Image (tube, rainbow, N blue to C red):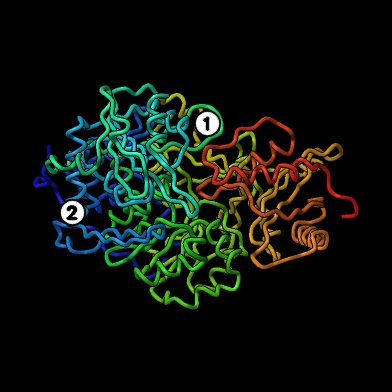
Amino acid sequence: MDSGNSRQTIAAPPSPGASVPIDEYRALHQRSIADPAAFWLEAAEAVTWSTPPRQALDSSRAPLYRWFPGASLNTSFNALDRHVLAGRGNSTALIYDSAMLPARQHFTYSQLRDEVALFAGALRNQGVARGDRVLIYLPMVPEAVIAMLAVARLGAVHSVVFGGFAPAELASRIRDAGPKVVVTASGGLEPSRRVEYLPAVAEALDLADARDCSVIVKHRDGFTARPADYDQSSRRWLDWRDAVADAVPADPVDVEATDPLYILYTSGTTGSPKGVVRDNGGHAVALTWSMRNIFDVGEGDVMLTASDVGWVVGHSYIVYGPLLAGATTVLYEGKPVGTPDAGAFWRLIEEHGVTVMFTAPTALRAVRRADPDTAFLGTYDISSLRILFCAGERLDTGTSSWIGDVLGVPVIDNWWQTETGWPICANPRGLGGLPIKPGSPSLPSPGFDLAVLDGGGAPVPVGTEGNIALRLPLPPGALTTLWGSDERYEEAYLRAFEGFYVSGDSGYADEDGYLFVMGRTDDVINVAGHRLSAGAIEQALAQHPAVAECAVIGLEDALKGQRASGYVVLKAGVTREPSELERELVALVRRLIGPVADFRSAIVVDALPKTRSGKILRKTMRQMASGESYIVPSTIEDASVLDTLAPLLRAGSPRPGV
């Protein structure tokens, strides 16, 4: 076990310049593609290593690539200890803000390090060692961050599961990861209810037949179940306080750069979950680079990422990224609206001096729908905010321009996936930024060699929509495999087009190389032989002043094969006569897309079905409309929305006279 005393601290490179011309950025990106070894070894100097890397890329098992072979480090040390050793122990690392309780709590870097070291000792008492797995099933409470960093401190592997998953889904992840310990809480808080976790955990462990798995429970007031209610001779259930009572703080354990840091399961509707594996070294290098150069966040900044630690955005930019950068991160337990109102984000910005915010377009559309005139904004001072980043769902131009005008700060879209771990395409604000093109997440980030391909794997012309793919190798920070199955990783991502990772998204690049992501590849609608993007039609619908958000799906049509059908949610307080609004929306699509869209149907709905991370369930909507069997995704936010939507989806053909 390494106490950290032998670590070699390498000075960080100087801060980037004030601006970067687009040609200069293209040259930087090309250098990352032409000479990735030099580029990423230079970037690795911003990380603290026990054994510094001498080699950047190991391609001996291509297409299974590994970054920084032979190097060693500890990610928890990089996120906490090194800042304390640098004299910044009294700087605020973590702010916990619960709109549900309400509660506020601040942790300095020294305090957070001590909490993490103590809980790492408690995990060690349960037999957790380097390479073991720990499953974390927690709401948005400080213990979630502490548990993640404690697992990393031991050189173990964490798998965070979004709090509130049903027992069967939780069991499938327990079965796949084989954790030695499950860390959970009494329950989670929703605006209208409390969700008991312990019955779900107990059922999941039984379903997974995980007899020897220990459970550590963070007690929360207001929940009835206790660890003692479930303690069995073959399985220990411990209260968090009891677990740490006799623990000795653990020092950081060095691991290979290529060793796994975490498993994060992607959501899906069928089959066993896919456990994305992130390594230690590449992850630390990529996130450190992205914090400085993409998000322009460093010491003294306060970053609010309005997501959940159960999703990749929470892993990368609530927990690891800000702490690797030495910044302050805000952990928010609440909603963008309803806890208590549509001014929740503005309160957080004022109260905590937030300088950089990151959220999903869905959250912004929810705020716009509830408070289209931003009446709540006027009661808060948000002058500390200098930039807003968005990702998770396509950022339509209407939402982007609205929030930009309201806040008076740049609104920066970025596009990435659970699998990549950090932005594939982004506007590098830490380098000064590139010109913003509404609707585009800008240019590829270093190391991402992007191509738009047709069905046969050939590049398409500029401006033509196709399959977005990434040439191998992927850069540091991206997935290295799927847990337990290299074969499944290759089958799922690498075999459609030889030498490429397939993103599953469609889009096009313009003459400047800016990418426009239109949606999943199965969100293409074929109308009389014309392939139309559902995302493009949605973008047109979103420009109507009455529309808060929308979804477009392709329905079967006896004459033309498919036709586009739109479903729109109106802004709060807006009432329109349905047939009149539909005529306006049809005319808008025909004007912006053209008659080729043959768009005839736009139906007003109360809500759209979404996952908890904000993605609209278009595939499920299509399946319902066509009468196919479907599985309600385990990640759905509110299943009752599907029940309300079902008769509208099954209604079939466009109404006459439109």
Specify the quadrant that holds the C terminus: bottom right
Relative to 529, is 317 on the left or the right? left
Can residue 537 be seen from the camera position used here? no
Numbered mark located on residue 362 in the image: none
The residue nearer to you, when weighing 196 against 139, is 196
Which element carries disc 2, helix, strand or loop? Answer: helix
Tell me the quarter of the picture where residue 282 sits. top left
Q: Residues within 10 Å of mark 2 (few under 14, many from 20)?
A: many
The residue nearer to you, when weighing 123 against 485, is 123
In the current view of this chain or complex, which residue is farthest to the right? 657
Expressed as whole percent of the image width and height from the top left, the position of residue 436 reads 53, 65
Q: What residue sits right under mark 2 in the picture?
A: 82
Expressed as whole percent of the image width and height from the top left, the position of residue 605 reads 70, 53
Can residue 322 be seen from the camera position used here? yes
- Of the image marks 1 and 2, the number of the one nearer the N terminus: 2
| Residue sitting at x 40%, y 26% | 176
| Residue sitting at x 27%, y 33% | 237
The kind of residue on which mark 1 rests is: Glu
| Residue sitting at x 68%, y 53% | 536
Expressed as whole percent of the image width and height from the top left, the position of residue 629 reads 67, 30
Q: What residue sits right under mark 1 in the picture?
A: 498
Tell me the quarter of the picture where residue 248 sits. top left
The kind of residue on which mark 2 rests is: Arg
Q: Residues within 10 Å of mark 1 (few under 14, many from 20)?
A: few
Specify the quadrant that holds the N terminus: top left
